[in-house]
C-alpha cells in the first residue's frame, strides 16, 4: 500500500449519463463521439424497454430507421445502432417516445495524422481513489468484456512494462508515478454479423497525490524483531497514517490485553508525521517482559482494509564483549608468562634441546678443543690457590669427565716457561671458546702483559673467531683495573659467576657454563679421527 492514494483523472469531453427522459424539447446536452468507421449506439431515453412507438428525427427530419440487423444503421428497440458510423452520420438525433423528447448530438471524428487518437475527443473519467486503474469506457454495450480482447497503448505505443496489469476492461498501473501520466488508448476488437469491428477510446491519465482521499497506511510496526531484556518494560506503537480509530493490537486473532494480563493497550491518539500527514497511533505497553512474550507475533491490524503487520519480541543476543576482553587479557597474560619462562629457563631449554635428538651437530670446523682456559697464572706460587684449584681440578672434573668437553688449560697442557708462543697461538686457534677465569682481586696486574692473552683477545674480539666466556670466581670484581678488552666483554655479555665452595655441586653454574660452551662433545671422535 502506498502512503498516499492516487487519483486518476481522465479528462476529455465525451460522456453520456443514463439521464431521465425529460419533457423538454430540443435542448441537447448529450454528445456522442465516434471515430469514423467504428460502431456507435445511440440509446433513446436511458433504459426504456419499449421500442414500438419511438420516432427518430435527424436534424429535425423524421427518419424511419430499419430494424434489420444487417443494415448499417438500424434500430433495435430504443437504441439506434451504427455499424459502423461514417462522417456523414454526424448530426442531432432526437427520439420521441410518447410525450418525451430526447436528444443526442453525434460527432464523427478522425484521428490526428499518425496518431491513434484525436486530442479533442478524449474520454473523461474520474477514478475513485486507490489503485491506479484505467477503465476502457463503454465497451460493455458492444461486447462481453470477460471475453473481449482489449489492447492497451500509451501514446499509441503498445505497453510492454511489467508494471501494467490488464484485466477485463481495466488496466492497472502498479506503483504509479508521475512518469506514468499520458494518453492511454484501449482498442477492443470484436465481430458483429461476420465483420470485424474495433472500438477505440483514449484517456488522458493524470496521476496526482490526492488531497482528500487517502488509504490508511500502517507505518509501524513493520514486521520486525525487537530485542528486549527479560523483565523490562516496553511500549510498542502502532502508527497509521490517514488512519481512523479502527485498528487494534492482536495476538492469535484476539486483542492482546485479553490474552496477557500484563499487557495494556492504550487509547487512540492523533498527531502529525514529519511530512505533516495526520496519524493515529496506539500503544501496546508491556509492564514486564516475560518468557511467554518472546517469539510471539504481536500484530497491529487495520480492520477495514485487513492490513496487518507485526512486532516479534526476542531475547537480546548475549554480549560477547566481556568474554572477548577476558580472553585477550588472559592470552596476553599467558604470552607474557611464556616469554618470562623462556627467559628464565632459556639455559635449560637450550641444553635440553642440545641433548635431544633434534639437535644438529657441530659444524665441522676441524678444531681440536672445545675451550681454551685462560687464567692468571701464579708462576711462583703453589697450585693451592682457589683459582688454580678451580681451573686445574674443578673445570676438568666436570667439563671433561662429565660432559666430555676437551679443554686446553695453559698451566696443564703446556707449562709456563717453555717457548710457548707458538703452542698457545696454535691451541687458541684450535679452540671453539675462550674461557677467561677471573680470580682474586689481589693480583691486580694479572693478565696484563700476557702474550697469550693478547693473541686470544685479538682472535676473540677483532676477528671474532672465538666466543669468550668470562667466569668470575669472586663477588664484586673490580674491572676498572683490567684490560679494556675484558671490560668490553663484561659490558657486552656479562660473566658467569661461581658461587659457593668447590665441594658443593653448583648445577646452575654448570648449566650456564654448558650453555655458553659449544654443543655437547658429540663430534669428539669425529675430531679425533
Ligand atoms: C491532466 O494533466 C494535464 C497536464 O499534465 C492538464 O493539462 C490537464 O488539465 C489535467 N487534467 C485534469 C482532468 O486534471
Ligand atoms: C425487454 O423486452 C424484451 C422483449 O420485449 C424482454 O425479453 C426483456 O426481458 C425486456 N427487458 C427488460 C429489462 O425489461
Ligand atoms: C403506440 O401509440 C399509439 C398512439 O400513439 C397507441 O395507440 C399504441 O397502443 C402504441 N403502441 C404500443 C405498442 O404501445
Ligand atoms: C445536420 O446538422 C449538422 C449541423 O448543423 C450538419 O453539419 C449536418 O450536415 C446536418 N445533416 C443533415 C443530414 O442535414
Ligand atoms: C478532431 O476532432 C474534431 C472534432 O471534435 C475535428 O474538428 C478535428 O478535425 C479532428 N482532427 C483531425 C486531425 O481530424
Ligand atoms: C489461539 O487461539 C485459539 C482459540 O482462539 C486457541 O485454541 C489456540 O490455542 C491459540 N493459539 C495460541 C498459540 O495461543
Ligand atoms: C504506554 O506507554 C506510553 C509511553 O511509554 C505512555 O505514554 C502511555 O501512557 C502508556 N499507556 C498505557 C495505557 O499504559
Ligand atoms: C491520548 O488520548 C487520551 C484520551 O483519548 C488522552 O487522555 C491523552 O492525553 C492523549 N495523549 C496524548 C499524548 O495526546
Image (tube, rainbow, N blue to C red):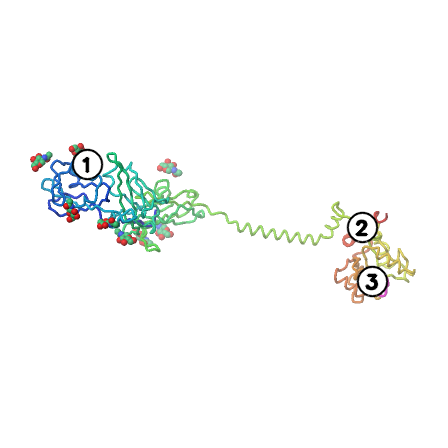
Residue at image location 88% in from the left, 62% down from the top:
378
* Total labels drawn: 3
Left or right of 396 on screen, residue 105: left
Marks 3 and 1 sit apart, C-alpha to C-alpha, by 147 Å
Tag 3 and tag 2, C-beta contact below 8 Å = no
Sequence-wise, the earlier of marks 3 and 1 is 1
Task: Give coordinates of residue 389: x percent, y percent.
Answer: 86, 56
Secondary element type, mark 3: loop
Q: Determine if the magenta segment contains residue 120.
A: no
Circle nearer the viewer, 3 or 1:
1
Residue at the image position 79 percent from the left and 56 percent from the top: 500
Within 10 Å of disc 1 (Cα), the crowding (few <14, some 14-19, many 20+) is some
Counting residues from the start of the chain, the first of labels 1 and 2 encountered is 1
Report the magenta stretch's main SS.
Answer: helix
Which portion, as a residue range, is magenta? 446-458
Residue tagged 2: 364
Give percent across and percent down for residue 437: 82, 59
Mark sitting earlier along the chain (3/2): 2
Q: Name the residue beneath numbered marker 1.
A: 71
Residue 91 sits above or below residue 272 on the image: above
Residue where numbered disc 3 is placed: 440
Amino acid at each position: 500500500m502506498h502512503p498516499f492514494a492516487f487519483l486518476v483523472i481522465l479528462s476529455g469531453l465525451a460522456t453520456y449519463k443514463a439521464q431521465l427522459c425529460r419533457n423538454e424539447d430540443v435542448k441537447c446536452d448529450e454528445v456522442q463521439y465516434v471515430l469514423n468507421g467504428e460502431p456507435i449506439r445511440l440509446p433513446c431515453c436511458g433504459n426504456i424497454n419499449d421500442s414500438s412507438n419511438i420516432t427518430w428525427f435527424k436534424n429535425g427530419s423524421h427518419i424511419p430507421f430499419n430494424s434489420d440487423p444487417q443494415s448499417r444503421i438500424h434500430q433495435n428497440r430504443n437504441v439506434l445502432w451504427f455499424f459502423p458510423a461514417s462522417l456523414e452520420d454526424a448530426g442531432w438525433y432526437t427520439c420521441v417516445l410518447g410525450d418525451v423528447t430526447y436528444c443526442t448530438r453525434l460527432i464523427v471524428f478522425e484521428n490526428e495524422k499518425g496518431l491513434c487518437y484525436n486530442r479533442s475527443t478524449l474520454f473523461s473519467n474520474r477514478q475513485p481513489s486507490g489503485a491506479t486503474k484505467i477503465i476502457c469506457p463503454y465497451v460493455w454495450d458492444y461486447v462481453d468484456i470477460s471475453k473481449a480482447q482489449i489492447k492497451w497503448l500509451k501514446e499509441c505505443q503498445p505497453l510492454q512494462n511489467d508494471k501494467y496489469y490488464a484485466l477485463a476492461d481495466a488496466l492497472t498501473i502498479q506503483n504509479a508515478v508521475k512518469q506514468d501520466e499520458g494518453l492511454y488508448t484501449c482498442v477492443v476488437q470484436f465481430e458483429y454479423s461476420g465483420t470485424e469491428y474495433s472500438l477505440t477510446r483514449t484517456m488522458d491519465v493524470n496521476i496526482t497525490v490526492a488531497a482528500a482521499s487517502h488509504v490508511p497506511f500502517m507505518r509501524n510496526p513493520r514486521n520486525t524483531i525487537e530485542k528486549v531484556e527479560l523483565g523490562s518494560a516496553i511500549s510498542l506503537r502502532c502508527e497509521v497514517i490517514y488512519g481512523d480509530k479502527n485498528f487494534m493490537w492482536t495476538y492469535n486473532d484476539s486483542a492482546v490485553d485479553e490474552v496477557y494480563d500484563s499487557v495494556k493497550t492504550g487509547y487512540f491518539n492523533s498527531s502529525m508525521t514529519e511530512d505533516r500527514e495526520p496519524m493515529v497511533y496506539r500503544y501496546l505497553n508491556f509492564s514486564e517482559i516475560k518468557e511467554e512474550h518472546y517469539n510471539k507475533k504481536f500484530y497491529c491490524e487495520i480492520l477495514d482494509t485487513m492490513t496487518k503487520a507485526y512486532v516479534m519480541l526476542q531475547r537480546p543476543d548475549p554480549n560477547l564483549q566481556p568474554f572477548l576482553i577476558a580472553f585477550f587479557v588472559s592470552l596476553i597474560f599467558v604470552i607474557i608468562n611464556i616469554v618470562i619462562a623462556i627467559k628464565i629457563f632459556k639455559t635449560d631449554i637450550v641444553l635440553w634441546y642440545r641433548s635431544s635428538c633434534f639437535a644438529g651437530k657441530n659444524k665441522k670446523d676441524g678444531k681440536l678443543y672445545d675451550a681454551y682456559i685462560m687464567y692468571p697464572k701464579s708462576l711462583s706460587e703453589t697450585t693451592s690457590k682457589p683459582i688454580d684449584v678451580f681451573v686445574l681440578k674443578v673445570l676438568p672434573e666436570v667439563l671433561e669427565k662429565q660432559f666430555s668437553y676437551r679443554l686446553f688449560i695453559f698451566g696443564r697442557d703446556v707449562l709456563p716457561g717453555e717457548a710457548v708462543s707458538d703452542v698457545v697461538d696454535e691451541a687458541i686457534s684450535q679452540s671453539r671458546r675462550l674461557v677467561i677465569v677471573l680470580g682474586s682481586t689481589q693480583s691486580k696486574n694479572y693478565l696484563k702483559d700476557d702474550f697469550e692473552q693478547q693473541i686470544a683477545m685479538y682472535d676473540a674480539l677483532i676477528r671474532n673467531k672465538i666466543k669468550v666466556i668470562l667466569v668470575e670466581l669472586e663477588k664484586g670484581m673490580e674491572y676498572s683495573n683490567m684490560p679494556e678488552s675484558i671490560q668490553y666483554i663484561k659490558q657486552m655479555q656479562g660473566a658467569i659467576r661461581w658461587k659457593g665452595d668447590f665441594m658443593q655441586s653448583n648445577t646452575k653454574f654448570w648449566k650456564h657454563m654448558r650453555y655458553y660452551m659449544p654443543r655437547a662433545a658429540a663430534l669428539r671422535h669425529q675430531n679425533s679421527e
